[in-house]
Amino acid sequence: MNPSADLVQKLWRLCAVLRKDGITYQQYVTELTYLLFLKMMAEQKREDGKIPAGARWGDLVAEEGIKRLALYRRILADLGDPEKRLDRTVQAVFANAATFIREPVNLDKLVAAIDDLRWFSEARDSFGDLYEGLLQKNAEETKRGAGQYFTPRVLIDLLVRLMQPKAGETIQDPATGTGGFLIAADQFMKASTDGYFDLPSAQQKFQIHHALHGMENVEGVYRLLLMNLFLHGIDSWHIRLGDTLSPDGAELQKADLILTNPPFGPAGGRPSRDDLTVTAAVSSYQLPFVEHCLRCLKPGGRAAIVVPDNVLFEDGRGRDLRRMLMDRCDLHTILRLPTGIFYAQGVKTNVIFFTKGIGDSGETQNVWIYDLRANMPAFGKTSPLTLETFADFEKAFGADPLGRAPRVDQGEEGRFRCFTREFIAARGDNLDVTWLRDTSNDAEDTLTEPEELIDALMGHLKSALLEIEALGEELASDPVA
């Protein structure tokens, strides 16, 4: 086991102890966020000017029992108090912070465990890997909640490799979650520039302070996001708390590259942005997020977006959005993902890859579809994704991030096919194209864990609700129909 994974296991085992205090997995990771932040500020000698005296890690370690718990509660309240005028990142991490721990002995165990970990036996980036490991453990244990914002690292790394972010580009994730896409993009660019040391000083400054942009709407997730970025040494100045489908999202800077896994399902209301003209009447997340990405790309910019199946076939506004996408962009590739990778078996997902046109050019001529769903097993906690899962697709996609590398149509027996724009238009611009006969049993037949079966049922219900919602919106917008 590698050192970071070992630390994850050590910290995660403490969760079993804290469960007796009524603390959930999600609350535990949030609690760790507060304590790890204080610990790391002390380790990196960055407390001066950011953490007031009396609210530092050393102060917490010096107390014990009831006094320590009282001090901890006071620290959380003080660091999140907007009237204190503290460092922006500190206040964002501790905004509305409150501890879930009731028993002093449990806080004592947690502080002792964190304080005893040999942090400096690790490379700097391993701190971030440790925290990401905790986020992944949380996602695995709390699938129904975490699946909304946690994307498997294997898929993140695949999309980053295919899209090849470059130094000097503005990169955006409008549904940032815990920051996986932005962190992976930053690491990819650092690997090709010797940690940005190969760049001129002005470009180094751009990469560190201005290259990465994003928005997250859930305050609890935003807290985890800021901590994750902090531990990876990434400036969070352009990563905002807000609703991308509100006017706040319209203020996000135009991007050269968008990588995102937006939320699926009902949004609780229609977008309040004036510029989302096609999806203005749509009250689910997925279609408006796709329109946001289309509009927020610079000419010539590229995107890779995870979307549910209904984006490919929904009539009404969905069809209008696909037409606009294919008219204004080169929608060159669709990857049909296996089931179960987002901890909801019944929700079927895809990745759409497109490049925004420049001027009058950029219209889609051909759409290549790779079917990685037919005759595939269900993926989940007991059968995780691996690099090998995507190896053939990555080879078929090619080395060009714009999808222009030489490709081979594998025919009706293969997984990679090319379909012309005329063929798609004859289908009413329905992109839900299948050709492989799935001879395997339903992937969900292999599920045995009660939680996985419940997740599968919930996924099917969510998919049905999306289709019913789309039908209702179409009828509302066209009374004659």
Image (cartoon, grey):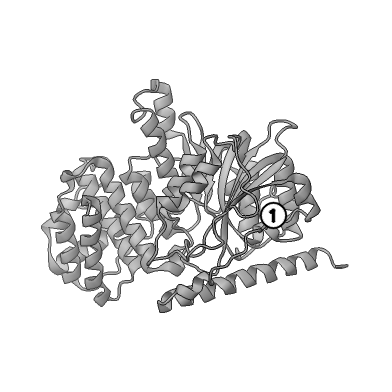
**Quadrant of res 230:** top left
Amino acid type assigned to the residue bearing label 1 in the image = Leu
Residue lying at 39% horizontally and 30% vertically, measured from the top left: 192
Residue lying at 71% horizontally and 61% vertically, measured from the top left: 314
Residue 89 relative to residue 280: left or right: left
Report x, y in % for residue 53.
20, 48
Q: Secondary structure at mark 1?
A: loop
Figure check: 326 above or below 435: above
Judging by the rendered image, the residue that carries numbered circle 1 is 431
Foreground: 286 or 95? Answer: 286
Report x, y in % for residue 119.
18, 48
Foreground: 35 or 80? Answer: 35
Figure check: 398 above or below 376: above
Figure check: 254 above or below 76: above
Foreground: 373 or 278? Answer: 373
Residue 160 relative to residue 132: left or right: right
**Quadrant of res 363:** top right
Q: Outermost residue toward the right?
A: 480
